[in-house]
Image (cartoon, rainbow, N blue to C red):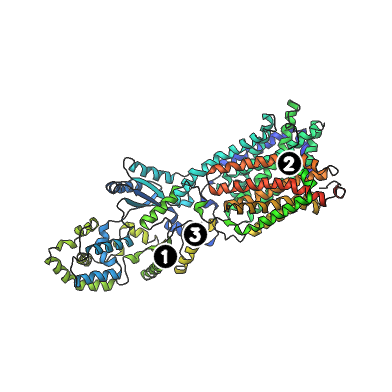
Amino acid sequence: MIERFLNFVVRRSTSRPVSVLVTGVSLGVSFIYVISLPIDLSFSGVMDRSHPEVSRYFETSDRLGLGGQLLILLEGPEDELNAVVPEIQLALDGLDPVDSVWVAPPRDYFIQRAAWMVERPLFDRWVSSVEGASLSSDQSTFLAELDEAQGRLLPPAQPEARLVKVQMAEDSFELALDADDFPKIRNAVGEVVAETHVDARFAGMAAIIRQENEATLKRMGVLGPLSMVLVLFILSFIVRRFSVLATIALPMLLSVGCTLAVVGLLEGRLTLMESIFGVIVFGIGIDFAIHLLVRLSEERDAGFHFPHALRRSMIGTGRGVVAGGVTTAGAFLILTWAPEPVFYRLGLAGGVGLALCLLFILFLLPAQWTLLERWRPGIVRVRRRRKEGLLVWVASRATIFPRSVLWVALLLLILAGSLFPAFRYETNLERVFSPQIEAVRTARRIHDLFDLDPGPWVASANDLAEVQRLHQAFAEDPTFTRVESLALIETQDQAERARILQGLAPQLARRLREQGRTNRGRAEDAREVGSGLRVPPAALLLNAHTVGPPLRDSLPDSLASRWIGPDGELLVYAYSANPSMDSRVAHQERLAAQAIAPGATSMSIIYEVLVGTDRPWMPTVVFGVLFFVGCVVWADLRKFRLAILALVPVMVSAIWTVGLLNGLGFSFNTVTLVAIPILFGLGVDDGIHVVHRMVELPEAPLRSVVGSVARSIAMTTWTTCGSVALLLLTDHPGIESVAVLLGVGLPMTLLATVTLIPASATIFWTPRQENEPIES
């Protein structure tokens, strides 16, 4: 079937090259359809919302705006800070991306009601000091206790730092990566502090996503086209004419546009994963062209005229090209079995894209080469080799010492296997993100200063009693360091405190008059506690009795909007004692939080799911890739022994590669998993081409057989490695890990191909057993 298909391609492309070229270009420019497609470049677009915890987070976030919280850390001289905070609040209030701005409520709100809000032991000590000890005793201890009590309700006071919280109009995960919501906020704050000595920094997912975009994703947009330029530059070492290079570039460019159109038509939108697809296409797609071009040059050097040489190349090498293309595209398509959108979308784009790239190359290359030959005969060929290369020498050594080669390979397998216990999987998203993301460092600084972080755990309650229970449980759990809720101001013993204050009021007033401090209980004087004045507990107790207990209906807006949800539910916020983007830490936090409140959720859920190891579907996908590749190779070669021979290099080199990387301390991660189908798909391609040539030339020495394909498989390896090497320029550890894995794995596969196949064939393969043609 493959041979009939290839015969049809050759006849059609050579008899009607202009028609084929026009048809291909017309199909390729269908990417114009992409212009009308919605493009979802948000992280939400590639998240698994079917996951129960992720679904709960987004449902809660949609109601409460959890993902839209942005923290602004201001550091500088205290007098300038006091001046710029109101200006920043005023500047942000008028911006469309901003829903609300939170600044610390006036300190006098706490001072006036301190006796109602402090913990009971401190309240009792204040009462005891009034009833017994001198009013002025141990003022330093009293003020320290008051500051500590204030810190439970408000972020701890810092003389040279202020914190502003911004509630954005949209969830950070819903924002497109190129959205200007965060830049507008950053610019507005920057204009306010421009003429001051105040430094403004940002924390929160909105800042992380934008800084990640600026640090990495914009580079990806440049690296895609640069990838094509680089592989064409590498190819120029064997291709003499620019016009021939252009014939190779055209099918790849058209396949990218057509792929975006097809995926958009199937899914209704394009996401982040399709935006990085170009690097893969240019690195892999050019391999198809290299095999055909090198084989065509060899046939012409053997004396065949162009039409006959082209047909021999398409029928001979084309079979391996089709088999290799199907295995790689199929390996990607199997990723669509994964429930996670990241893998599904990449699998769909990779599978569809490589299949289309294969078709474009099979049809357009013969058509374009036919037109070039009519214009200038002899132009379509590669430079001749002056001498046999290193790979041919290595292959000849393998045929001379086959058993030694196999024993060495076995020992290396055992050594690599012994290093598998050292396998490391990176679960900390900070080490997968770009190190240039300042928002991560700012979040740590905010936690050190204020015991806050942008992703607290949130639980809801129906009444105050439940809030108080949750608040106490979170406060007693060492996993959490700070808890905020209405329980801070509506204490369980509020009625009892009211009776105590009512009974003490006459005594408090009398004793204060006796010492000439009657006005100390007024709000004006209480406000001055923050300035360090020596105010006795009696003044605070009397002032609290005068003002009365804090009421829910009279809360400052900054507190009411945070503690009371839009539907009237009461909210409890618990901040992690050790905030981290590590999925293991997030998992432990979730277990602790949901043991207290089963419905609790946090942005940490995203970290747990995104970089966690809980992927029960992964073994099925990996097995599916291996099974599919094996079936395609067997279907192509039609003999079990030959299929095993073609698969040995990729299986052995995969174990070598993982073992070597484990020994070097390499950390695998979620992004690295993307390289698995690429490694298997490309790795088996080398073995397929060598075995095909062995069957095609059954009487030829193995050294000559390997030499006939060594140049093409070497060039495909170097062009692909050159393409993925550009990923090292992203300054993104996750993406760079893909380049490292492929950069080690593909050369390892090349080495295994030119050693293990000749050595194994020398011992186990008899040409007479396999010299009949392979029927399709």
Task: Estimate the spatial distance between the alpha carbons at disc 1 and disc 3, rounded to whole Å.
Answer: 17 Å
Between 742 and 62, the residue placed more toward the observer is 742
Nearest-to-viewer mark from 3 and 2: 2
Q: Label 2 is placed on what type of residue?
A: Leu
Residue 461 visible somewhere in the drawing: yes
Q: Horizontally, is 6 left or right of 732 in the view?
A: right
Q: In x, y percent, where is residue 768?
A: 88, 48
Q: In x, y percent, where is residue 415?
A: 67, 56
Q: Residue at x 14, y 63 (%)?
A: 518
Q: Which residue is mark 3?
A: 605
Point out which mark residue 460 bears. 1
Q: Is disc 1 in contact with disc 3, using a CB cutoff of under 8 Å?
A: no
Q: What secondary structure is found at the residue carrying circle 1?
A: strand
Q: Horizontally, is 707 left or right of 620 in the view?
A: right
Q: Residue at x 33, y 62 (%)?
A: 152
Residue 271 visible somewhere in the drawing: no
| Structural crowding at the residue carrying mark 2, measured as other residues with C-alpha within 10 Å and reported as few (<14), some (14–19) or many (≥20) | many
Q: Horizontally, is 648 left or right of 536 in the view?
A: right
- First-in-chain label (1 vs 3): 1
Task: Estimate the spatial distance between the alpha carbons at disc 1 and disc 2, rounded to whole Å.
Answer: 67 Å
Give the residue furthest to the top: 376
Give the residue furthest to the right: 768
| Structural crowding at the residue carrying mark 1, measured as other residues with C-alpha within 10 Å and reported as few (<14), some (14–19) or many (≥20) | many
Q: What secondary structure is found at the residue carrying circle 3?
A: helix
Point out which mark residue 391 bears. 2
- First-in-chain label (3 vs 2): 2
Nearest-to-viewer mark from 1 and 3: 3
Q: In x, y percent, where is residue 44?
A: 51, 52
Q: Label 3 is placed on what type of residue?
A: Ile
Q: Label 1 is placed on what type of residue?
A: Ser
